[in-house]
Amino acid sequence: QVQLVESGGGSVQAGGSLRLSCAASGHTYSIYSMYAMGWFRQAPGKEREGVASIDTDSSNTRYADSVKGRFTISQDNAKNTLYLQMNSLKPEDTAMYYCAADTRGRTLVAGPLDPAAYNYWGQGTQVTVSS
């Protein structure tokens, strides 16, 4: 079992920054041992979409086109924590943001930004960007 707890959301004006954190716990897995971890978001009335992912052993990253150059995903293995640094925020970034982990390797087939490839999810943290 893996428990994921997000934090760091909030309300900011357009152009501002936020850093989301996702603390992972559970006796079986460390971040390093997972196939991948990712950040996803879901706005009201929309499907959940992949924002960024990281292969936790190689640190290879992937980003949605809409956030490239603005968001940065990173991990701290010592703290077993995943981060998402969000800069130059736009109103369209407003959503609930979720952290997820793939412990089965399905991101290798489905792709690192496919929500269906992840089997553990946090409860989410709200990000609201005002214009």
Image (cartoon, rainbow, N blue to C red):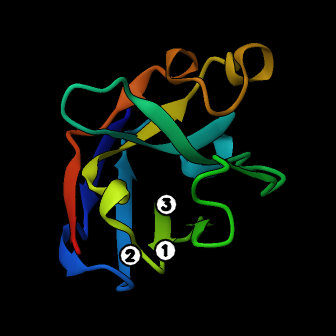
Q: Which residue is mark 3?
A: 82
The image quarter containing residue 127 is: bottom left
Q: Is residue 79 visible?
A: no
Q: Tally the marks.
A: 3
Residue visible at 49% across and 74% down in the picture: 85
Mark toward the start of the polypeptide (2 vs 1)? 2
In the displayed orientation, state which residue is furthest to the front. Answer: 131
Q: Secondary structure at mark 1?
A: strand
In this rendered view, identify the residue nearer to me: 42 or 116: 42
Answer few, some or many: residues within 10 Å of disc 2's Cα (few below 14, many 20 plus, some between 14 and 19). Answer: some
**SS for dot 2:** strand
Q: Residue at x 84, y 53 (%)?
A: 58
- What percent of the width, then of the height, locates residue 40? 44, 41
Tell me where residue 34 appears, x and y as whole percent: 63, 37
Residue 105 vertical position relative to residue 18 in the rendered view, above or below = above
Q: Distance from label 3 to label 2 (Cα)?
A: 10 Å
From the image, tell me which residue sits under label 1: 85
Q: Give the Cα distance between marks 1 and 3.
A: 10 Å
Q: Residue at x 63, y 46 (%)?
A: 64
**Pointer 2 with pointer 1, Cβ within 8 A:** yes
> Which labelled disc corresponds to residue 19?
2
- Tell me the crowding category of disc 1: few under 14, some 14 to 19, or many 20 or more residues within 10 angstroms, Cα based: some
**Whole-percent x, y for residue 110 in the image:** 71, 15
Of the two numbered discs 3 and 2 on the same chain, state the one appearing first in sequence.
2
Can residue 35 be seen by looking at this rendering? yes
Q: Quadrant of residue 113?
A: top right
